[in-house]
Amino acid sequence: MAFSSKASLVSLVLLLLTLQLVHSHSMTVGATDKSLPPATNCKGACLIRCSKSGRPNLCNRACNSCCSTCKCVPPGTSGNYNVCPCYFKITTHGGARKCP
């Protein structure tokens, strides 16, 4: 009889630990989903970003490439890199900033 109560107690503790792990995992998954940036319309955002560029085709190509990597484009036609730090950090092989 003593063995049966010990086994039941161990089973109950394992069940509670499993439930706690499942609950903490579901809370973590929910938190990361909320931290993802909203989807960006890269093509539209880059058309605006490059609207005053002297070389709009080159600008759009670079902007769309950066947007596909970072999932964001800074607002306006220049600057505002603090809104999308990833966009600012991408460089070419030569070390120059790639994103317009």
Image (cartoon, helix red, strand yellow):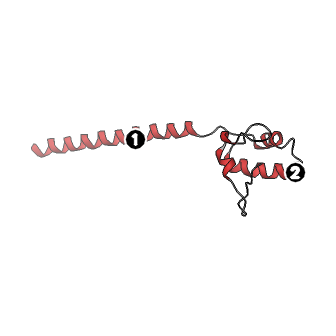
- Residue type for callout 1: Val
Q: Is residue 54 left or right of residue 77?
A: right
Q: What kind of element bears circle 1?
A: helix
Residue 8 point in image, percent of width and height: 20, 41
Quarter occupied by residue 22:
top left
Q: What kind of element bears circle 2?
A: helix
Residue 53 point in image, percent of width and height: 87, 45
In this view, the residue in front, 30 or 43, is: 43
Q: Which residue is mark 1?
A: 22
Separation of residues labelled 2 and 1 (CA atoms): 50 Å
- Pointer 1: residues within 10 angstroms few (<14), some, or many (20+)? few
Q: Which residue is mark 2?
A: 57
Residue 9 point in image, percent of width and height: 19, 41
- The vertical placement of 27 against 97, above or below, is above
What mark, if any, has residue 95 been given in the picture?
none
**Which residue is painted at 73% across and 59% down in the image?**
92
